[in-house]
Image (cartoon, rainbow, N blue to C red):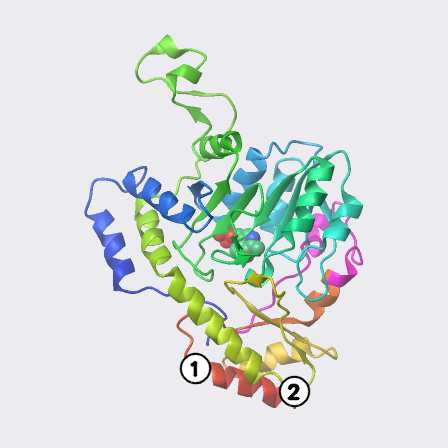
Amino acid sequence: MLPYGRQSIDESDVEAVTGVLRGDWLTTGPAVAAFETELARWTGGVPCVSVTSGTAALHVAYAAAGVRAGDEVVTTPLTFVATAATAALLGAKVVFADVQPDTGNLDPDAAEALVTTRTRVVTAVDYAGHPADYDELREVADRAGAVLVDDAAHAIGSTYKDRPVGSLADLTTFSFFPTKTVTTAEGGAVAAADPERFRRAARFRNHGLVREPGEQRFPGEGGWHQEVHAFGLNYRLPDVLCALGISQLRRLEGFRARRAELVERYDTLLRDVPGLTLPARRAYVRPSWHLYPVRVRDGRRREVYERMRAAGIGVQVNYLPAYWHPVFEDLGYRRGLCPRAEAYYAEELSLPLFPGLSDAEQDRVAETLAGILR
Ligand SMILES: *Cc1c(COP(=O)(O)O)cnc(C)c1O
């Protein structure tokens, strides 16, 4: 089965990992800071904290934003459930705002209509790698006194009005799962421009431990002493995986170029296929595409999904509206809440897109799809 996404691992990646395995530090060693430094070259210099997954990154970002029980987090339902689940786990009420019908990104006007004095965070998702509308979202968040978060699991390397993802929101989260553009097997990161939020993120990732004697309550305890001021978890990304991340980031420019080339080829190959809507792109963004999300009209998405799979083409659907998950239904969320996200979901189909996809394989995907719809 041709997958919808997969990692690209070459000898430089293998050597980076085996080099660490032969060394002294499997975790909490020098590769961690080196990876974070390399990552900050992609966020316009905004410092980064590496963590064990994109989900951990969201949990850390919400903690760093000060999300507490009773706060509200306004976000899009057209995302992986983790964007909302991590806020709910901190006791927040998740408020779903609808998406733009063409990009599938959080609609700033819909978010504006739902912010209240209790809104602590507004979280956008750069769906498929296409950045959301951050100038407008910034105004919404500022007017509400809320922190702006970018779930950029899809969007490392994307730019918006010539500014890189990572520098557009107050806190940005990345995922390095194998289907994503850069991988560390499992892994993620949080970018935070504000030094206090950065410090909270770095501490949360390491149990909340305070090591600086000048900041401790009991600094005279002894040289071994470290203390916890706010609860945290162990979300540390090991050196083995940070080394893989460093070698992957060296290849990111190439990944982005090949993904852009494949997207352009899909645009051409599928232009005249009936019943298909191709992904939209704003003139002022340069996406580092993670997905190629087409929409299959006329109620035929499920049929097309099944026939593509039967032909050995592993298409995917991204995403079930987050509040359709029974955990949200049991909390009282009902279908119909965000009609544009539901309409998008009803038609969405992600075609294979990854750097190792050959032109010939892509031609077969396009021909199979066209054959079903013609
Ligand atoms: C993949 C993904 C996540 C979660 O990342 P993991 O590394 O799998 O934990 C969160 N949000 C979005 C939009 C994602 O695509």
Residue visible at 54% across and 84% down in the picture? 366
- Of residues 197 and 5, the one drawn nearer to the viewer in this rendering: 197
| Magenta range | 313-340
* Marker disc for residue 359: 1
Is there any visible trace of residue 335 in the rendered image?
A: yes
Is there any visible trace of residue 329 in the rendered image?
A: no
Residue 204 in the image, given as x and y percentages of width and height: 48, 32
Up/down of 112 relative to 278, above or below: above
Question: Magenta stretch containing residue 336, yes or no?
Answer: yes
Question: Magenta stretch containing residue 232, yes or no?
Answer: no
- Per the picture, the main secondary structure of the magenta-coloured stretch is loop
Rate crowding at label 2 as few (under 14), some (14 to 19) or many (20 or more) other CA atoms within 10 Å: some
Which quadrant is home to the C terminus?
A: bottom right
Please, what secondary structure does the residue beneath circle 2 have?
Answer: helix
- The answer to whether 288 appears left or right of 338 in the picture is left
Residue carrying label 2: 373
